[in-house]
């Protein structure tokens, strides 16, 4: 599987929009670390973010909003919150 900035951003976006559970995000990240092909020019950044996502289900690490914001910034994106009536 090819792992690019956009692929990681899409996965994080799906999670943040409530369309995927944390365990799904973690499973994807673990698989991507083992089987993924990271762009050579960005392997340090991409693998670092994916590795962080891969341990997000562990109590010692977790995954906070601030963590997501920081990872998205590393990938060249900014997170915004939009509220809508339920």
Image (tube, rainbow, N blue to C red):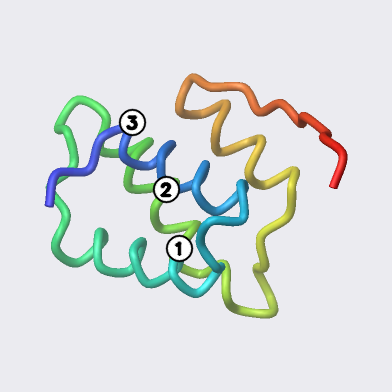
Residue beneath the point at 32% across and 38% down? 44
Read off the residue under disc 3. 6
For residue 1, above or below residue 22: above
Q: Which mark is residue 77?
A: none
Report, in whole angstroms, how far the alpha carbon at label 2 lies from the one at label 3: 9 Å
Q: Secondary structure at mark 1?
A: helix
Q: Residues within 10 Å of mark 1 (few under 14, many from 20)?
A: many
Q: Secondary structure at mark 3?
A: helix
Residue beneath the point at 42% across and 48% down? 11
Whether pointer 1 and pointer 2 mark residues with C-beta atoms closer than 8 Å, the reply is yes
Residue beneath the point at 48% across and 20% down? 76
71 and 21: which is toward the camera: 21
Q: Residue furthest right?
A: 85
- Asked whether, in this view, residue 45 is left or right of residue 17, the answer is left
Q: Residue furthest bottom?
A: 59
Read off the residue under disc 2. 11
For residue 76, above or below residue 38: above
Q: Residues within 10 Å of mark 3 (few under 14, many from 20)?
A: few
Q: Quadrant of residue 5?
A: top left
Q: Position of residue 49 (x, y in %)?
A: 44, 46
Q: Secondary structure at mark 2?
A: helix
Read off the residue under disc 1. 25
Q: Position of residue 56 (x, y in %)?
A: 57, 67
């Amino acid at each position: 599987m090819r792992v690019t900035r956009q692929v990681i951003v899409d996965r994080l976006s799906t999670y943040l929009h409530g369309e995927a559970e944390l365990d799904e995000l973690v499973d994807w990240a673990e698989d991507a670390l083992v089987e993924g092909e990271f762009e050579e020019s960005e392997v340090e950044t991409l693998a670092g973010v994916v590795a962080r996502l891969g341990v997000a289900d562990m109590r010692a690490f977790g995954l906070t909003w601030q963590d997501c914001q920081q990872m998205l910034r590393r990938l060249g994106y900014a997170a915004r919150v939009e509220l809508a009536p339920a």
